[in-house]
Image (cartoon, rainbow, N blue to C red):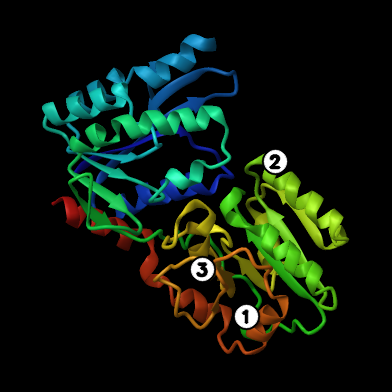
């Protein structure tokens, strides 16, 4: 099977999303598919173009013309897919249904090329709260055209949700783990002494639904426990600034460190430092109750215990996961230390428990679902 894996943005080295996309591509290849990645590229000279693997298939130029062209002209993708004899287009949905992407999907169908569309988060409308005018205009356009967009696809891929969506069959997969790029932490979870100090690590592209304000408030309410929080990643600047201000207002700024994006050995060192990892604590703010986040799986692959507030049926009953309330209450820090004190699993045992979540297994579901 010859597959074009289509994304509408660039691939960035330190981005967790980019790492996931590359791992999915490799997962398809491990299942025997011949895969080419189609994405945007901005090179060191500022040149903007769309590339299919290493070949430029559309030059965008500069300025406003370039911005408009990449959003309204997808003829290069359709031509490359048709002339290249692709059997399947795997599309990572970017909440970008509009007349131009609808036209692209219609042309794929007309030319006899099957398409599957992955919706990374579902439902997603609630994630646009507080995102500003332009993002909400994008959502409004998507609402107008999403049904027509999906009417031309063969399957929709979801991580949680219904068996059919927009009258199309759904293939359910889980977010996977690239074990080659996610090393095991050298510490064993069951041997971590947190009686003197509790070290918490959050790795995320920060948005409203990560809810770290709940954790910061909990740290302030339990100042008798020496709890240290490291936040790794970027995201919405106003939310990151609010975490910094909240920690200062509550007198615990020395315990909360916002480190920005990290990768490679620097990121590995943070996982070595941590006793426990922090999942999402505010998914209820965006109307999501059930989700399978990428970072939960990375935490487990690293061999760390972690906590979150949503529903994730891959981990809800795991002995190394603590579920906290899906509300606005401050996180009870003492519950974290009590949980870790009762841990009996080593880091290697935690990692072993998620071997079935490798990307080869997850992308095999896609191949089977479209065959």
Point 69% across, 75% down: residue: 332
Point 66% across, 56% down: residue: 267
Q: Image height check: is 289 above or below 315?
A: above
Q: Quadrant of residue 312?
A: bottom left
- At label 2, counting other C-alpha atoms closer than 10 Å, the crowd grade (few under 14, some 14-19, many 20 or more) is few
Which is more toward the observer, 269 or 334?
334
- At label 1, counting other C-alpha atoms closer than 10 Å, the crowd grade (few under 14, some 14-19, many 20 or more) is many
Give the x, y percent position of residue 96.
38, 31
Marks 3 and 2, Cα distance to the nearest angstrom?
31 Å
Which is more toward the observer, 166 or 232?
166
For residue 309, the mark is: none
Q: Image height check: is 352 above or below 64?
A: below
Q: Image height check: is 288 above or below 168?
A: below
Q: Quadrant of residue 111?
A: top left
Give the x, y percent position of residue 308.
55, 68
Which is closer to the viewer, label 3 or label 2? Answer: 2
Q: Which residue is mark 2?
A: 238
Question: Looking at the rendering, in which quadrant would you find the N terminus?
Answer: top left
Marks 1 and 3, Cα distance to the nearest angstrom?
12 Å
Badge 1 or badge 2: first in the primary sequence: 1
Marks 1 and 2, Cα distance to the nearest angstrom?
34 Å
Q: Secondary structure at mark 3?
A: helix
Q: Secondary structure at mark 2?
A: helix
Q: Quadrant of residue 302?
A: bottom right
Residue 14 visible: yes
Q: Which residue is mark 3?
A: 301
Looking at the image, residue 268 sits to the left or right of residue 152; the answer is right
For residue 189, the mark is: 1
- At label 3, counting other C-alpha atoms closer than 10 Å, the crowd grade (few under 14, some 14-19, many 20 or more) is many
Which is more toward the observer, 221 or 263?
221
């Amino acid at each position: 099977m010859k597959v074009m894996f289509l994304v509408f943005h660039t691939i960035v080295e330190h981005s967790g999303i980019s790492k996931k996309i590359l791992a999915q591509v490799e997962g398809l290849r491990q299942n025997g598919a011949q895969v080419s990645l189609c994405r945007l590229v901005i090179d060191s000279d500022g040149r903007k173009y769309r590339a299919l693997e290493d070949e430029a298939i559309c030059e965008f130029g500069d300025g406003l013309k370039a911005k408009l062209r990449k959003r309204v002209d997808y003829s290069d993708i359709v031509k490359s897919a048709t002339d290249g004899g692709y059997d399947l287009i795997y599309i990572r949905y970017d909440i970008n249904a509009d007349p131009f992407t609808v036209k692209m999907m219609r042309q794929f169908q007309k030319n006899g090329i099957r398409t599957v569309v992955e919706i990374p988060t579902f439902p997603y409308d609630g994630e646009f709260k507080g995102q500003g005018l332009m993002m909400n205009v994008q959502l409004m356009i998507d609402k107008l055209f999403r049904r027509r967009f999906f009417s031309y696809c063969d399957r929709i891929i979801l991580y949680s949700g219904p068996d059919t969506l927009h009258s199309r069959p759904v293939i359910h997969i889980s977010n996977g783990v690239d074990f080659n790029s996610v090393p095991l932490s050298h510490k064993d979870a069951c041997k971590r002494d947190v009686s003197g100090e509790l070290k918490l690590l959050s790795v995320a592209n920060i948005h409203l639904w990560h809810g770290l304000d709940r954790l910061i408030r909990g740290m302030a309410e339990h100042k008798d426990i020496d709890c240290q929080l490291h936040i790794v990643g970027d995201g919405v600047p106003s939310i990151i600034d609010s975490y910094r201000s909240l920690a200062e207002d509550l007198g615990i700024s020395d315990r909360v460190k916002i480190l920005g994006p990290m990768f490679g050995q620097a990121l590995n060192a943070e996982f070595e430092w941590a006793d426990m990892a922090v999942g999402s604590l505010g998914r209820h703010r965006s109307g999501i109750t059930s989700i399978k986040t990428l970072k939960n799986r990375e935490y487990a692959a690293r061999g760390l215990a972690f906590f979150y507030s949503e529903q994730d049926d891959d981990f809800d009953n795991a002995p190394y996961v603590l579920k906290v309330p899906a509300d606005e209450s401050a996180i009870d820090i003492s519950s974290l230390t009590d949980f870790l004190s009762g841990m009996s699993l080593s880091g290697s045992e935690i990692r072993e428990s998620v071997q079935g979540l490798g990307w080869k297994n997850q992308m095999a579901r896609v191949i089977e679902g479209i065959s």
